[in-house]
Image (cartoon, rainbow, N blue to C red):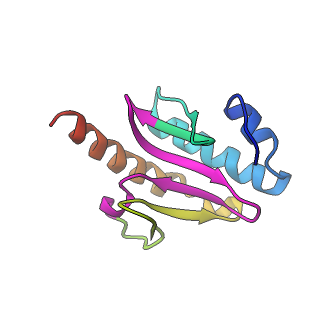
Amino acid sequence: MGKHANVREYVAVVPEGLREVLEKALAVVNEAMSGTGPALWHGQPTWSLGKQPVCFLKAYPKYVTFGFWKGQLIEDGSGRLEAMSRQMAGVKLRGLDDVDARLFTGWVEQASALEKDVKNT
């Protein structure tokens, strides 16, 4: 995916089948982050608290990654979060059924709390 001016342009070029997955995940995260919309950061929709990035969505040819900067610190009873580099963790979304609003909201709440703790120390 190339450079985009905003999240809307980013979403527009995602292939149709994955676009619906991305749009559903965007809606869930927007609701969970209440009042903090995504901005493009490192070329992908990213939600931040101040200057602290919390989570992101990134489209690949066959899936969308929903990731967290401090994802390895999130308690995940579902076992769906997979460790990534550093403290990051994420989940690959391949279809609409992979987007679990309740689970994702819990993750976002935990990730936001972790970033708020950083700001308060």
Can you say whether 70 is above or below 118 in the image? below
Can you say whether 96 is above or below 33 in the image? below
95 or 38, nearer to the observer: 38
Q: Is residue 92 left or right of residue 121?
A: right
Rendered location of residue 9, percent (x, y): 76, 34
1 or 78, nearer to the observer: 1
Residue at the far bottom: name it: 79
Region in magenta: 48-75
Task: Name the quadrant of the C terminus.
Answer: top left
As for residue 73 lying within the magenta part, the answer is: yes
- Residue 54 occupies which quadrant of the picture? top left
Q: Is residue 96 left or right of residue 80?
A: right
Rendered location of residue 83, percent (x, y): 43, 69
- Residue 2 occupies which quadrant of the picture? top right
As for residue 56 lying within the magenta part, the answer is: yes
Q: Residue at x 54, y 64 (%)?
A: 91
51 or 15, nearer to the observer: 51
Q: Residue at x 28, y 46 (%)?
A: 114
